[in-house]
């Protein structure tokens, strides 16, 4: 099959056609050859496919929220060709057999799946998984995401083994005793008597984990950073040469306690949405290149689990389908971040983290998406391919839209 993407702007800059034959990019530039299908892009942007190293697919065990098939559809709709899924499933991905089953299922799906294995058996924080065997089975990293590995001796050993294996450890950095509640610690939430998840919970956990990475020589990756103090700790240890990478989510970049209705459970997430000062610090760190990449932490939950009083609603935000448009609308259109930097933060940089390539070059497998920067759309439930609906952009008008995605060499999504 031959596709000709005609009249697009490569990286949003230079006019170029893209010829794709049997899954490979065979020509980029002025193409006059024919094709089975010619798609007129009318000046839309041709961009390297997005890559998300932090996604919750809920399979096995919670397929009523999401499964590998539905999450891959949501990813394709959002312009993604590679996603890494987290192991907080039921059972967790803490044994090679579980990983083997998931890998087999993922083979036929439209986007490429990578698997993060748990750090501890049952994600209980007590006993390490067989890290070597899980690496042999294909695990790309280790994480007990959703929980912090509280026991320092367990985490120390995990980092030691991970450094020998050459894989990163992804930490969900929140000391549990300081994060029993659900709200950011600030005057607004204090006034309403909320239970907190303190920024200090993140700062202390980040400190312990990067210090242990310094001693063990491991690569530590900080998931979903939310507090400005954590950035300071990371900066200090980076200057000392520690291999510490960090991701930020679209929701921590775009929302703050000053800007969201505090009682709306769709915004309940761990770590919580923090102050405007924290949000600004995250945006500035993103602009400065300090933050390695953007990851969605796509965390689908069933409507009945979210449409509950704030105290009972489950934490998590879904958003593979809307991530790029939301950041384009609020950071690129406003002049804060260039399109080139946003693409790098959601494509090239996370691709490097996972050790994959999505470059639009002749000879490579086609992994790209087409983005119409002029589109304006109000996000509706039917725009979400996920099984869940806990997306905070529902009802909002976004600028720019993914209209086509090639992943694994095939057309994975088309509007
Ligand atoms: O809010 C969250 N939900 N934070 C996490 O780290 C885990 C996620 C989930 O799995 O629902």
Image (cartoon, grey):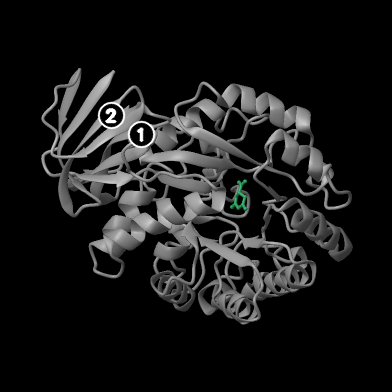
- Residue 380 found in image quarter: top left
Which SS class for mark 2? Answer: strand
Q: Quadrant of residue 379?
A: top left
Q: Is residue 167 left or right of residue 395?
A: right
The answer to whether residue 415 is seen in the rendering is no
The one of 339 and 20 positioned closer to us in this rendering: 20
- The image shows residue 166 at horizontal and vertical percentages of 71, 53
Q: Nearer the viewer, residue 164 or 112?
A: 164
Look at 83% across and 63% down and name the residue there.
156
Q: Which residue is mark 2?
A: 20
Residue drawn at the location 55% of the way across and 32% of the way down: 66
Q: Residue visible at 63% across and 61% down?
A: 221
Which mark sits nearer the N-terminus, 1 or 2?
2
Q: Is mark 2 within 8 Å of ligand 1?
A: no
Quadrant location, the N terminus: top left
The residue drawn where x is 37% and y is 41% is 78
Residue assigned mark 1: 366
Question: Is residue 333 placed above or below 52 in the rendered structure?
Answer: below
Viewer-nearest residue: 303 or 31: 31
Is residue 64 in view from this perspective? yes
Is 213 in front, or is 182? 213
Q: Is residue 193 left or right of residue 77?
A: right
> Residue 283, position in %: x, y?
41, 71
Label 1's element?
Answer: loop
Which quadrant of the structure image shows residue 79? top left
Q: Position of residue 90 (x, y in %)?
A: 72, 34
User: Local crowd at mark 1 within 10 Å, few (<14), some, or many (≥20)?
Assistant: many
In the image, the residue with mark 1 has its CB under 8 Å from the nearest atom of ligand 1: no
Separation of marks 1 and 2 at Cα, in angstroms = 7 Å
Q: Position of residue 311 (x, y in %)?
A: 62, 54
> How many residues crowd mark 2 within 10 Å: few (<14), some (14–19), many (20+)?
many
Q: Are marks 1 and 2 in contact (CB under 8 Å)?
A: yes
């Amino acid at each position: 099959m031959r596709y000709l993407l005609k009249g697009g702007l490569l990286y949003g800059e230079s006019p170029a056609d893209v010829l794709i034959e049997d899954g490979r990019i065979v020509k980029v530039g002025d193409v006059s050859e024919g094709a089975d299908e010619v798609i007129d892009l009318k000046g839309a942007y041709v961009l390297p496919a997005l890559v998300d190293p932090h996604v919750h697919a809920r399979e096995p065990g919670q397929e009523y929220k999401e499964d590998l098939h539905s999450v891959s559809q949501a990813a394709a709709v959002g312009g993604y060709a590679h996603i890494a899924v987290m192991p907080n499933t039921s059972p967790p991905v803490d044994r090679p057999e579980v990983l083997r089953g998931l890998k087999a299922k993922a083979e036929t799906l439209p986007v490429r799946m990578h698997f993060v294995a748990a750090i501890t058996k049952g994600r209980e924080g007590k006993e390490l998984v067989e890290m070597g065997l899980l690496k042999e089975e294909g695990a790309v990293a280790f994480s007990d995401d959703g929980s912090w590995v509280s026991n320092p001796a367990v985490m120390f050993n995990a980092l030691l083994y991970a450094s020998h294996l050459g894989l990163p450890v992804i930490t969900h950095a929140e000391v549990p005793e300081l994060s029993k509640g659900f709200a950011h610690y600030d005057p607004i939430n204090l006034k309403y008597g909320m239970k907190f998840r303190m920024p200090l919970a993140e700062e202390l956990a980040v400190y312990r984990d990067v210090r242990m990475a310094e001693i063990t020589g491991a690569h530590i990756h900080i998931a979903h950073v939310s507090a400005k103090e954590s950035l300071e700790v990371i900066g200090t240890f980076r200057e000392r040469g520690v291999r510490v990478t960090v991701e930020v989510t679209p929701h921590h970049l775009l929302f703050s306690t000053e800007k969201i209705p505090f009682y709306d459970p769709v915004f309940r997430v761990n770590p919580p949405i923090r102050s405007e000062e924290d949000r600004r610090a995250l945006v500035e760190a993103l602009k400065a290149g300090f933050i390695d990449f953007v990851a969605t932490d796509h965390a689908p939950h069933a409507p009945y689990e979210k449409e509950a009083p704030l105290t009972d609603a489950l934490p998590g935000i879904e958003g593979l389908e809307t991530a790029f448009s939301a950041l384009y609308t609020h950071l690129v259109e406003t002049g804060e971040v260039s399109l080139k930097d946003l693409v790098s933060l959601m494509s090239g940089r996370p691709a490097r983290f996972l050790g994959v390539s999505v470059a639009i070059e002749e000879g490579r497998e086609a992994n790209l998406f087409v983005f119409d920067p002029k589109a304006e759309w109000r996000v509706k439930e039917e725009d979400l391919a996920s099984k869940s609906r806990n997306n905070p952009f529902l009802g909002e008008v976004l600028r720019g839209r993914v209209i086509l995605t090639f992943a694994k060499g095939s057309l994975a999504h088309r509007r």
